[in-house]
Image (cartoon, grey):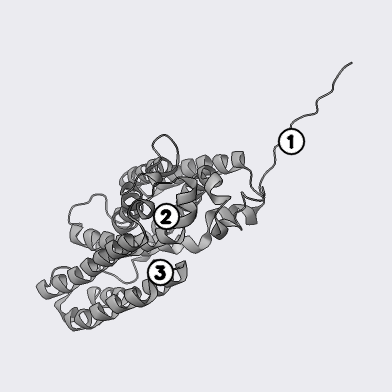
């Protein structure tokens, strides 16, 4: 008896399913610190027209391409845990709108594309993107899998947003890092830790059941919340100190910083907690944009 085997059909995921993996809502999370880096480098609210093409290409890398790469590979290796996580019930991988193999191909393809496109911006920017892709894979892929190593999970995410984001914006404008205000990277990273730690609480029970040793699983809900609160206070306090010293943050913002610190601390207590959802983080981050926006206007001489 002869068995005929037809050609294997390679399925291409639909665009809307690829976008679902890439989570467009997340793109602004990295584009905002990227813009902060551009602001610091140019001292301009709106950069000169001649650099717009390069900046827009950089924004495509920082938004769609990098997020698709790191989220697709994360979804692929988090699939066993996502199956028992109610918050991930709409993941395209759970109902096989995107298969496991396709997610890995998307991750690799978007990672390679992000590096290739980053070269258009410049070598320094591209080097940073290479590091971001490597860390993104190290975060999710065994045996390294930094997501399950308490402390490293926080460091990767917080440094990516608080330090790498502004550095990328700076590198998209300038050829080197001379003059980069590293204290702003510190301030951004402290704030990112304060905002990231509570997000680990939303998946605490699912991560514990799946055996993922995240920082929340290791420390417990209450200790994780307190640690995030401490970093948030440190970030707010540093902004007051910088304004008082007239170091990057203009002294003219000191009064606003003194007013906003207790507001931001109180908001953390109000909207963030051991049993929180992501809605609280969104509200808190939105409040944080007020002093950030005022800084942008003051730093560029608009106010």
Residue in front for this viewpoint, 27 or 202? 202
The crowding category of the residue bearing disc 2, from other C-alpha atoms within 10 Å (few below 14, some 14 to 19, many at least 20), is many
Q: Which mark is residue 62?
A: 2
Residue sitting at 29 percent across and 70 percent down? 44
Residue picked out by circle 1: 9
Quarter of the figure with the N terminus: top right
Residue sitting nearer the eye, 60 or 293: 293
The residue depicted at 25 percent of the width and 74 percent of the height is 300
Q: First in sequence, mark 3 or 1: give its number.
A: 1
Cα distance between the residues tagged 3 and 1? 43 Å
Say if 124 sits above or below 257 in the image.
above
Q: Closest to the observer: 145 or 109?
A: 145
Q: Secondary structure at mark 2?
A: helix
> Would residue 111 be visible to someone looking at this image?
yes
Q: In percent of the image, x 24 and y 77: which residue is there?
A: 261
Residue indicated by mark 3: 281
Which numbered tag is attached to residue 239? Answer: none
Q: Quadrant of residue 294?
A: bottom left
Q: Position of residue 164 (x, y in %)?
A: 31, 53
Instruction: Tell me the mark number nearer the camera, choosing from 1 and 2.
Output: 1
| Vertical comparison of 13 with 284: above or below | above
Q: Which class describes the residues within 10 Å of circle 3: few (<14), some (14-19), or many (20+)?
A: many
Label 1 Cα neighbours within 10 Å, binned few <14 / some 14-19 / many ≥20: few
């Amino acid at each position: 008896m002869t068995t005929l085997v037809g050609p294997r059909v390679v399925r291409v995921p639909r665009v809307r399913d690829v976008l679902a993996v890439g989570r467009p809502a997340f793109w602004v999370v990295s584009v905002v610190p990227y813009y902060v880096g551009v602001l610091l480098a140019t001292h301009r609210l709106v950069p000169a027209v001649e650099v717009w093409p390069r900046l827009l290409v950089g924004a495509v890398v920082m938004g769609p391409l990098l997020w698709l790469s790191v989220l697709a590979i994360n979804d692929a290796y988090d699939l066993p845990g996502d199956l028992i996580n109610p918050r991930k019930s709409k993941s395209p991988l759970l109902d096989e709108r995107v298969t496991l193999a396709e997610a890995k191909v998307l991750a690799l393809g978007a990672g390679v594309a992000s590096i290739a496109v980053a070269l258009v911006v410049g070598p320094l920017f591209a080097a940073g993107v290479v590091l971001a892709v490597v860390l993104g894979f190290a975060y999710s892929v065994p045996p390294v899998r930094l997501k399950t190593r308490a402390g490293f999970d926080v460091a990767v995410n917080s440094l990516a947003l608080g330090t790498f984001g502004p550095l990328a914006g700076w590198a998209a404008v300038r050829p080197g890092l001379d003059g980069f205000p590293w204290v702003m990277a510190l301030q951004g990273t402290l704030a990112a830790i304060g905002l990231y730690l509570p997000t680990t609480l939303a998946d605490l029970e699912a991560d514990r059941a799946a055996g993922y040793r995240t920082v929340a699983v290791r420390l417990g809900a209450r200790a994780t919340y307190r640690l995030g609160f401490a970093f948030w206070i440190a970030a707010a306090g540093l902004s007051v100190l910088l304004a008082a010293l007239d170091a990057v943050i203009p002294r003219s913002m000191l009064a606003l910083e003194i007013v906003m610190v207790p507001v931001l601390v109180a908001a953390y207590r109000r909207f963030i907690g051991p049993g929180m959802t992501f809605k609280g983080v969104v509200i808190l981050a939105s409040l944080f944009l007020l002093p950030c926006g005022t800084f942008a206007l003051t730093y560029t001489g608009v106010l």
